[in-house]
Image: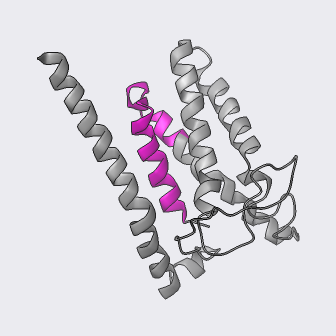
Amino acid sequence: MASVFSHAVVAMALGKGFKIEKTGRRIFLLGSFCAIVPDLDVIGFYWGIQYGDLWGHRGVTHSLFFAIMLALILTLVFYLRSPPSIMYRAFLYLFACGSSHGFLDAMTNGGLGVAFFSPFNTSRYFLEFRPIAVSPIGVSQFFTERGAQVLVSELKWIWLPSLILVAALELLEGLRAIKHQG
């Protein structure tokens, strides 16, 4: 899995792409929540749930179905009384954040893959491009030399591309503003 830090970074970068900053800070927190919450499935280990089970790590909570349902629930709870355009944009952003989790994990070099289509199909998948070092599970294991290696990998493959995306979108926004002034 990618670390919780990197999942949150991607949510912040996606926010710029969806232009959700105008809807307030709460949406960024919700986006980060959607990007991080799939990893709560690791608590299943304490209850005897196996990694490869439906509710195991990278199972149903990493699926596109889960991302849709989470985005729908949060949109209805927090944006039901908002104008339709804001509701729609909030839903798409929250879904993108939630689904980004599985895609980042599918780009790691370890684990059993991601059950993108769970609960309908529990097969697990990786993407062809898998440059991200897999993060150790557990806080105590993360703050080790291995965890430092993972952070370096994530800085290169997640944080830097996210920063480039935000910078490119800022540049495009600035160019559009100049064009409209002239």
| Quadrant into which the C terminus falls | top left
Residue drawn at x 73%, y 60% as measured from the top left: 114
Residue 103 percent across, percent down from the top left: 61, 55
Occupied quadrant, residue 136 = bottom right
Q: Is residue 95 visible?
A: yes
Residue 18 belongs to magenta span? yes
Magenta segment, principal secondary structure? helix
Is residue 108 depicted above or below 26 in this figure? Answer: below
Residue drawn at x 36%, y 47% as measured from the top left: 165
Residue 21 belongs to magenta span? yes
Which residue appears farthest toward the front when viewing the image? 128
Is residue 167 depicted above or below 182 in this figure? Answer: below
Residue 26 percent across, percent down from the top left: 48, 34
Residue drawn at x 45%, y 80% as measured from the top left: 148
Residue 177 percent across, percent down from the top left: 20, 24
Q: Nearer the viewer, residue 91 or 121?
A: 121
Chosen colour scheme:
one colour
Residue 108 percent across, percent down from the top left: 59, 69
Q: Is residue 82 visible?
A: no
Which residue appears farthest toward the bottom when viewing the image? 145
Residue drawn at x 62%, y 18% as measured from the top left: 80
| Quadrant into which the N terminus falls | bottom right
User: What's the magenta region?
Assistant: 3-30
Q: Nearer the viewer, residue 36 or 108?
A: 108
* 29 sits left or right of 51 in the view: left
* 59 sits left or right of 83 in the view: right
* 137 sits left or right of 145 in the view: right
